[in-house]
Image: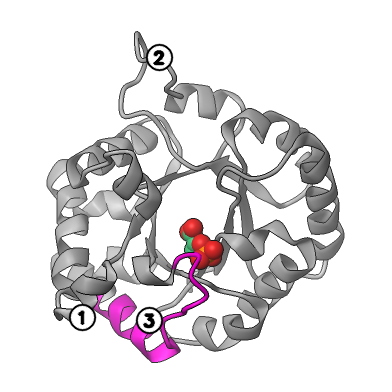
Amino acid sequence: MRKPLVAGNWKMNGSRESNIALVKGLLEGSSQIANAEILVCPSFVYITEVAKQLEGSSIAYGSQDVAKEEVGAYTGEISVGMLKDIGCSYAIVGHSERRALFGDTDVIVAQKFAAAQNGGILPVLCVGELLEEREAGQTEAVVERQLQAVVDLVGISALEKSVVAYEPVWAIGTGKTASPQEAQDVHAFIRGWISKEDAAVAEKVRILYGGSVKAANAKELFSQADIDGGLIGGASLAADEFISICEAAG
Ligand code: PEP
């Protein structure tokens, strides 16, 4: 039985003040949620403060990215060792914004995945197609290519200690959500693809859906057989909305 996970990706939003209010709201609301795991991914600079506020709670915290290198002369980068040092348990890798805007290729994403896992942090591997790729009928091929790059580097069994997030790029921050059936079809494809290599891993790995999830559509999405929670951007910045999404998963 896979425990649902709802992850908030705060992106480059927030301030010390707004984070305190947001986390306060999450702490108040999360006490009613028993059957879903909650994760927040603040900007790097705020992780430590958010962690202090979350101390003693069941809400996990993680990062939005991680360096592929372990240590050394990589100005501006944050290593997995540093993230582990401050108690992160997850790191998002391969978010579509990083792929599109910061040059994260499939190979680099795979290296970041490996770095996170080797350093004891669970990678949340984002995959997903562009609108033109969906329209050209290439969704499965794109997702397969993105997964294959990771499997080529770390092997199929490594997926067991990770989370996959299917995020159609056309649905991220656009207000357009994949229909529950569209999302389920891709999730089933991903699980089936993993299963061809290792059925036990496929059964265990959580596959999140991301792309304009909100309280109003979360329940229907999360009730699909292969959707094990969500990766939430915009709606994770409002405590009440995010808690309602967590309730829908739990
Ligand atoms: C995301 O950035 O991962 C995301 C899913 O964003 P949003 O929920 O705002 O579409």
Question: In terms of depth relative to the viewer, which is nearer, 239 or 12?
Answer: 12
Is the residue 117 above or below the residue 26 in the image? above
Contact check, label 3 and label 2, Cβ < 8 Å: no
Q: Residues within 10 Å of mark 1 (few under 14, many from 20)?
A: few
At 58% from the left and 64% from the top, the residue drawn is 6
Residue at screen point 44% across, 28% down: 80
How far apart in space, not on screen, are marks 2 and 1 (Cα)? 39 Å
- Which residue carries the number 3 mark? 183
Is 29 displayed left or right of 100 in the figure? right
Q: CB under 8 Å between callouts 1 and 3?
A: no
The residue positioned 57% from the left and 58% from the top of the image is 7
Q: Earlier in the sequence, mark 2 or mark 1?
A: 2
Q: Residue at x 34, y 44 (%)?
A: 101
The image position of residue 224, as x and y in percent, is: 45, 86
Q: Amino acid at mark 1?
A: Glu
Q: Quadrant of residue 71?
A: top left
Residue 48 image point, x, y percent: 69, 29
Do we see residue 230 in this rendering?
Answer: yes
Q: Which mark is residue 135?
A: 1
Local secondary structure at mark 1: helix
- Quadrant for residue 26, please give it: bottom right
CA gap, disc 1 and disc 3: 15 Å
- Of the image marks 3 and 2, the number of the one nearer the N terminus: 2
Along the polypeptide, which appears first: circle 1 or circle 3? 1
Nearest the camera: 33 or 98?
98
Q: Horizontal placement of 137 versus 126: left or right?
A: left
Q: Which residues are magenta?
A: 172-189
Q: Quadrant of the C terminus?
A: bottom right
Residue highlighted by disc 2? 75
Disc 3 residue type (three-letter): Ala
Give percent across and percent down for residue 11: 55, 47
